[in-house]
């Protein structure tokens, strides 16, 4: 029963808590960038088919680019950790006295003294793995991220596509002859995007343990500013190249 409770605490909704940050990151970026494309196209008075084409092209290209960047960022971080850990193993093996003195200095600074300090140093340095792990955490202040590059990139891409497609739904349905009036499309898209950003903002607040209304407001504000800029740029360019 206790094991089950630990497992449940590691998840929020259907996601592992450790990957929620990637989902939020991808979702916010996906919704904001796609809605910005929609707003820019609306400002330039482009047709429904153009909005859909630009939106989907942006969705796939940006989502892939973002996930690739996330993959390499995570991989570099893990490789950097492994490289430093291998160096610490070498130093423990070949510079044992120096490394042992560093362990003593670390725990002496924490307030350990006399026989207790000697015992702590002896216990830590008697196990090479514990010794290296202690040096990684205490000296280099490095901890290995358990998240894998493939999983972080996948979660980011999936989130970007799912949440980022929401601003396009009204236009896609309109393109399928749903009966939605053309002049209402941007309004529907704005409402849908607002709902999406509200949900992602709430999820972000759960992860960061911030005030939820503040987290939602921040996410909506960023999305609104991006759309506003895109709309006026699109409108200006349409006036220039009309």
Image (spheres, rainbow, N blue to C red):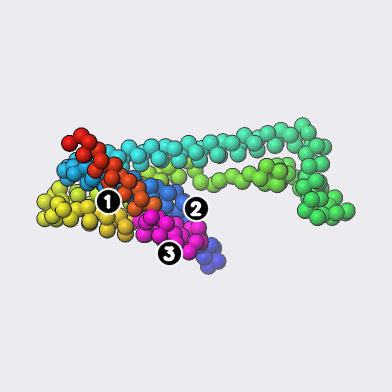
Reading the image, the residue beneath label 1 is 167
Label 3 neighbour load within 10 Å: few <14, some 14-19, many 20+: few
Magenta span contains residue 122: no
| Mark 2 Cα-neighbour bin, 10 Å: few <14, some 14–19, many ≥20 | some
**Which disc is residue 230 wearing?**
none
**Of circles 1 and 2, which is in front?**
1
Disc 3 target residue: 213
Q: In the image, residue 238 lies at what x, y percent?
A: 21, 39
Q: Nearer the viewer, residue 107 or 3?
A: 107
Q: Which residues are magenta?
A: 197-221
Which comes before the other along the chain, label 3 or label 1? 1
- Tell whether 68 sits left or right of 122: left
Report, in whole angstroms, how far the alpha carbon at label 2 lies from the one at label 3.
23 Å
**Position of residue 213 measured from the top left corner of the image (x, y, whole percent):** 42, 64
Residue at figure coordinates x 13%, y 49% from the top left: 176
Can residue 205 be found in the magenta stretch? yes
Q: Quadrant of residue 55?
A: top left
Marks 1 and 3: in contact by CB < 8 Å?
no
Name the main secondary structure of what is drawn in magenta: helix
Rendered residue at 77%/53% (across/down): 110
Q: Is residue 133 above or below residue 13?
A: above
- Of marks 2 and 3, which one's residue comes earlier in the chain? 2
As helix, strand or loop, the secondary structure at mark 1 comes to helix
The mark that comes first in sequence, 1 or 2, is: 2
Of circles 3 and 1, the one toward us is 3
Residue 37 can be seen, yes or no:
no
Q: Which residue is mark 2?
A: 18
Marks 1 and 2, how far apart at CA: 27 Å
Q: Is residue 44 above or below residue 186?
A: above
């Amino acid at each position: 029963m206790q094991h089950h409770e630990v497992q449940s605490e590691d998840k929020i909704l259907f996601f592992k808590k450790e990957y929620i940050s990637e989902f939020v990151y991808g979702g916010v970026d996906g919704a904001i960038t796609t809605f910005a494309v929609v707003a820019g196209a609306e400002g330039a008075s482009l047709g429904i088919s153009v909005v859909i084409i630009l939106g989907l092209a942006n969705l796939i290209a940006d989502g892939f680019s973002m996930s690739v960047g996330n993959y390499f960022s995570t991989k570099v971080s893990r490789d950097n950790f492994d490289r430093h850990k291998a160096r610490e193993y070498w130093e423990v093996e070949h510079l044992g006295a120096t490394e042992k003195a560093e362990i003593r200095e670390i725990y002496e600074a924490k307030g350990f003294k006399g026989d207790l300090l000697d015992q702590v140093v002896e216990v830590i340095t008697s196990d090479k793995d514990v010794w290296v792990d202690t040096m990684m955490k205490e000296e280099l202040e490095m901890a290995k991220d358990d998240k894998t590059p493939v999983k972080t990139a996948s979660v980011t891409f999936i989130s970007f596509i799912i949440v980022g497609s929401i601003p396009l739904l009204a236009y896609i349905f309109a393109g399928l002859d749903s009966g939605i009036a053309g002049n209402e499309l941007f309004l529907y898209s704005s409402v849908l995007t607002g709902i999406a950003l509200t949900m992602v903002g709430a999820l972000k607040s759960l992860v960061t343990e911030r005030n939820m209304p503040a987290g939602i407001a921040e996410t909506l504000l960023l999305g609104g500013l991006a759309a506003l800029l895109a709309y006026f740029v699109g409108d200006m360019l349409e006036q220039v190249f009309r």
